[in-house]
Image (cartoon, rainbow, N blue to C red):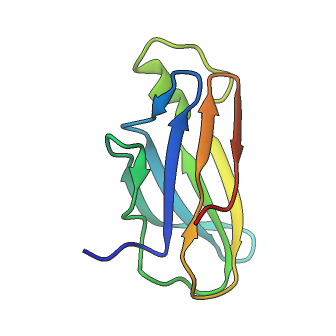
C-alpha cells in the first residue's frame, strides 16, 4: 500500500487518546478558490494515510477537519465546529500535518 503525499494524525489531548472517526478533506488552492482532492476518516489510531495522490504539485493546500461532528458523537461541547489548516507544499517530500485537539483549543506543526 502506498502512502499519500499528505497524511495527518489527530490526538484528542483533552481525552488523552487518538481522535478516531474524524472526517478530513484535502483541498488544493487554484488561485482564489479551493478544489477538493481527497477525503478520508481517521482510523482507530487517529491517522488518515489515504489523503490523495502520492505526489502533489507545489502550491497551497488545506486540510479541513470535521471536529464538531467528532465532539457531537461523544456529547462534548466544542468551540470549533471545524478546523482548517492551510500549508504550502514546496517539493516532493512527504508532508505530515498533525492536529492536537481539545474542545476549546488546537495546535499543529509540521510532522515527519
Name the residue located 49 percent from the left edge and 23 percent from the top edge. Answer: 71
Mark yes or no: residue 106 visible.
yes
Give residue 106's quadrant in the image.
top right
What is the x, y in percent for residue 8?
51, 56
Instruction: Name above or below for residue 25 compared with residue 51.
Output: above
45 to the left or right of 107: left
Instruction: Name above or below for residue 61 compared with residue 109.
Output: below
The quadrant of the rendering that contains the C terminus is bottom right
37 to the left or right of 21: right
Give residue 46's quadrant in the image.
top left
Furthest residue in direction left, as rendered: 1
What is the x, y in percent for residue 82?
60, 37
Instruction: Name above or below for residue 42 compared with residue 81.
Output: below
Furthest residue in direction right, as rendered: 32
What is the x, y in percent for residue 30?
66, 77
Comparing 12 with 25, the one in front is 12
Name the residue located 41 percent from the left edge and 73 percent from the top edge. Answer: 4
Report how many numbered discs are placed on residues in the image.
0
Give residue 65's quadrant in the image.
top right
Name the residue located 51 percent from the left edge and 43 percent from the top edge. Answer: 10
Mark yes or no: residue 66 visible.
no
Name the residue located 42 percent from the left edge and 65 percent from the top edge. Answer: 51
What is the x, y in percent for residue 108?
69, 49
The quadrant of the rendering that contains the N terminus is bottom left
55 to the left or right of 112: left
Amino acid at each position: 500500500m502506498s502512502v499519500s503525499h499528505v497524511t495527518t494524525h489527530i490526538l484528542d489531548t483533552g481525552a488523552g487518546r487518538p481522535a478516531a472517526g474524524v472526517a478530513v478533506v484535502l483541498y488544493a488552492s487554484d488561485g482564489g478558490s479551493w478544489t477538493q482532492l481527497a477525503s478520508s476518516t481517521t482510523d482507530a489510531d487517529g491517522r488518515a494515510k489515504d489523503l490523495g495522490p502520492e505526489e502533489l504539485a507545489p502550491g497551497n493546500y488545506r486540510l479541513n477537519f470535521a471536529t464538531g461532528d467528532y465532539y457531537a458523537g461523544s456529547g462534548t461541547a466544542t468551540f470549533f465546529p471545524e478546523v482548517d489548516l492551510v500549508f504550502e507544499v514546496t517539493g516532493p517530500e512527504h508532508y505530515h500535518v498533525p492536529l492536537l485537539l481539545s474542545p476549546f483549543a488546537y495546535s499543529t506543526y509540521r510532522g515527519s
